[in-house]
Image (cartoon, grey):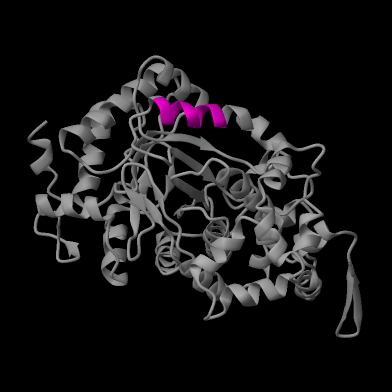
Amino acid sequence: MILKTRLYGKTYEFDSVKQVLNMASELKSGDSLAGLAAESKLQRVAAKIILSDFTVNDLRENPSVSYEEDSITRMIQDDLDEKAFSKIKNWSIAALREWILADTTTSDMILDVSGGLTGEVISGVSKLMGNLDLMYAGNKIKVKAQCNTVIGEEGVLACRLQPNHPVDDPKGIIASALEGLSYGAGDAVIGMNPAIDTVDSTIAIWNVLEELKNKYEIPTQTCVLSHVTTQMEAIRRGAKADLCFQSLAGSQKACDAFGITIDMLEEARHMFLDKGSAKGPNVMYFETGQASELSSRAHYGTDQVTMECRCYGLARHYKPFLVNTVVGFMGPEYIYDTKQLIRAGLEDVFNGHLHGLPMGCDICYTNHMPTDQNDSETLAMLLANAGCHFIMGLPQGDDVMLMYQSTGFHDVAALREITKKRPIREFEQWLEKWGFWENGRLGKNAGDFTLLSGRI
């Protein structure tokens, strides 16, 4: 492999494949703080030039963390579809990019080879793409999954209803959930982050959400985003829920910081398949986010995008129903401003789709970032056109428990109307029954959750 190139009279030479991948990344504050980013725009271009000539096999043979020391690397490598890999192993990364973007290349053709691509390969492809490339390719790749309903159908933009409450008060949870439902949120999942991560609180919230779903015959899924071990113990005690949640990271060391192992996640998946309340077969829900490995010093000198792609390589092993990147939650130390936020969101959705995942995005920011709600809305519009499976729905886009800003119920409704997209089919029919949705947009009863609350 050639690790140097000459550009405008200057020779740029890199130490390793990893350094080429690192420095080919678009600028992120986390990579800069970690000393991984290119020192100039020309150095970044030089890295992209070298990266473009690497083959798929080159990147497979040079994982960011070695096979011997990392269980995530071993899982990704051992899971690889060797037949698919053999078809494209000698392609350059530039050629793979051109093929993905070609008019004649279909979603099915891309998904036929995606199982042969490691996270490093997929990261490399994304680094050679502009934002419009990421949108075009992300929208092209169609991925479906089924829990109680099917996500990923053509023309659908789904929404996770997130009725978080500072003290997990059932009345507050129900109030937020009913309001969101009345605006068409909740078809992807009604999923709540608990303020208290205990077995008892998880069971209590599961019961609230399941009762709500069953009482009104809502065609959706429920989930409580406590730690996977908490949920497993709740299942052992006889509790019921549809989806099993866990945050993921792209290295074994970072997963250790989350308190998870590969075997633990596999046990949880089988437990939810056997004893959960979902139809399945996809019963896992994962969240990720660029730079979680950096924050736990478990990135092994690897850039944010590549480590994020390794999360997706881990996620696809468990055949999830939902995966979403929490794209601005880590703060300006990792994704500094609007430009970086937009780039990260587009990268993550494309990279997730190329892994064969039903990919959503929590378009969010913390209040110490130089961004605002206008920036979130801009990214939401871009992602709606990039094939993003789902976004979040919170009251006024404000999470009063986690203390960050995301997207609101009205945002989801407006995006659906502008892009001519709809909720998941069965959920849309449920909305129409209550008058919350009519003729492809919000209906006459939209926002009037008293129609539901009066029956509790």
Task: State the residue at coordinates (82%, 38%).
Answer: 68
* Residue 112 in picture, x, y percent from top left: 57, 62
**Quarter occupied by residue 219:** top left
| Residue 214 or residue 19, whichever sits in front | 214
- The residue lying furthest to the top in this view is 237
Image coords of residue 14 (percent x, y)? 88, 64
Does residue 269 appear anywhere in the picture? Answer: yes
Residue 163 on the magenta segment = no
Is residue 400 rendered to the left or right of residue 299? Answer: left
Residue 207 on image: x %, y %: 28, 25
Residue 18 x %, y %? 81, 57
Residue 195 lies in what quarter of the image? top left
Residue projecting furthest to the bottom: 8
User: What span is colored magenta in the figure?
Assistant: 266-274
Placement of the N terminus among the 4 image quadrants: bottom right
Q: Can you say which quadrant of the picture contains the C terminus?
A: top left
Q: Look at the image and tell me whether residue 366 can be seen.
A: no
422 or 26: nearer the eye? 422
For residue 222, side relative to residue 439 (left or right):
right
From this view, report whether residue 77 is shown above or below residue 12: above
